[in-house]
Image (cartoon, helix red, strand yellow):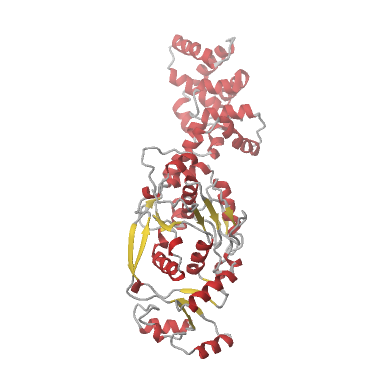
Amino acid sequence: MAEISESRRVRVRFAPSPTGPLHIGGVRTALYNYLFARQHGGDLIFRIEDTDSNRFVPGAEDYILKAFRWLGIRFDEGVSFGGNYGPYRQSERRDIYRKYVDLLLEAGRAYIAFDTPAELEAKRAEIPNFQYDASTRMQMRNSLTMSKADVDALIAAGNQYVVRFLIEPDEEVRVNDLIRGLVTVNSSVLDDKVLFKSADQLPTYHLANIVDDHLMEVTHVIRGEEWLPSAPLHVLLYKAFGWEDTMPQFAHLPLLLKPEGNGKLSKRDGDRLGFPVFPLEWHDPKTGEISSGYREKDYLPEAVINFLALLGWNPGNDQEIMTMDEMVELFNLEKCSKAGARFNYQKLVWFNHEYIMSKSDSEIAAMFMPVLESHGVRTTRERAEKAVSLVKNRVNFTGELWDNCSYLFQAPTSYDEKSLKKWWKEEAPVTTAQLCDFIESQPEFKGEILEPLVMEWIASKGYATGKVMNALRVTLVGAAMGPQIFEITDFLGREETLRRARKAIQILS
């Protein structure tokens, strides 16, 4: 288990950028942070990292919050939740960041650079694999190669600039990762990252992320594997500020891979194979494109959460179906895989079926009632529950209930050709009519009583049971499908059963 300091309360954060819909990989990152925080009695912070103003998408922040509400992931503080460490939106923290930019400049750990995009492009063309670092910075237009008077004059004249972090070469940078162990990187491979841009007076991710984590007293940074290359830089920034004692522990989660297992999961994979990669349906305000979501595709949020939890983490036993409380109890970052996790969307369908089966008929019926109403069916909750009990084991999604039990509420108006070809033989009208007469003559119309009597009658006539009963099924359902036939007749009742059967005989004869 990760070592937790008794003197520090566990605090973790999920910090998305409002640049579009929340990817399912981001949901998993938030989930692991949630499980870790709950297990240790800590806090989960929701922070919005919107320092890249050019990529801001209207509606994205609200979408992310709605997605987490649907999924059942609850935050303790942050944007829209309040708290004592705000503001939690980075665009509202400009003055805070400027203070720390100035601290680095004053300490000689950062410098001002005036290189234009054209100048940088020219240098890349001149030097193969160009990197702005100790080997090239003295060839560039920055405060290390210019006098203070010239720098001040350029700033006063309104010239745009960036502040870069000064990385000393040939220093071993160690990152202790809770999943990957000790990761060691030589600082010479790192470039002097931009920390601040005068154009919008905002920091880049690298500075804002470090300052916020420090000021918000974050103890553990649990994030995707794609951020692992940034970890050495972040360690150096903590040291530059003298914050080594409060540096959080890092844990970089494995990538979510395509269903085929090669490469990172993308929206294109979902479009190609027919599954969503977003929790909720997303309407792109710029293009008008609509992307499907798990909620609208009829997945249960509990199923999505359970499925995601096991993508890259093993609880150490054979248990697959787990409540959120069970996940909290079993979760262990050190049991997360280093290798990427294949996104087996067909397994998610299995999870959804299992969660449908685990819910009471009453819960599923509550979801089904609006569907019945949309098809013009007016019925009681009790009838809906009974219908659900007969067919829910046959569906993977609640949206499939209607196709699997519409015949319980509406008599068939057509009959499946394959079923007719197989079961509606020449003798079917006669045998079905005789069966109707026999059923009508019985004083009790309960399946448990009727079934043995019907079986005895079929045997006495010398008929084939399968032919007689499946012919009856076709008249009641319209096809050779559905639950046990006497469960259907119990649901329909004597009058409706006989009415349907006799009408079908008339039509099909």
Q: Which quarter shows the C terminus? A: top right
Q: Is residue 329 visible?
A: yes
Left or right: 306 in relation to 288: left
Q: Is residue 296 visible?
A: no
Residue 448 against residue 144 in the figure, above or below? above
Left or right: 16 in relation to 318: right
Residue 367 against residue 149 in the figure, above or below? above
Residue 399 coordinates in the image, percent (x, y): 55, 40
- In this view, the residue farthest toward the front is 7
Q: Nearer the viewer, residue 317 or 295?
A: 317
Left or right: 102 in relation to 371: left
The image quadrant that residue 129 belongs to is: bottom left
Q: Nearer the viewer, residue 141 or 248?
A: 248
Left or right: 26 in relation to 70: left
Residue 43 coordinates in the image, percent (x, y): 53, 51
The image quadrant that residue 192 belongs to is: bottom left
Residue 410 against residue 226 in the figure, above or below? above
Residue in the picture at 44% in, 85% down: 144
The image quadrant that residue 54 belongs to is: bottom right
Q: How many numbered circles does the render carry? A: 0
Residue in the picture at 61% in, 59% down: 59
Q: Nearer the viewer, residue 338 or 384?
A: 338
Residue 503 coordinates in the image, percent (x, y): 60, 24
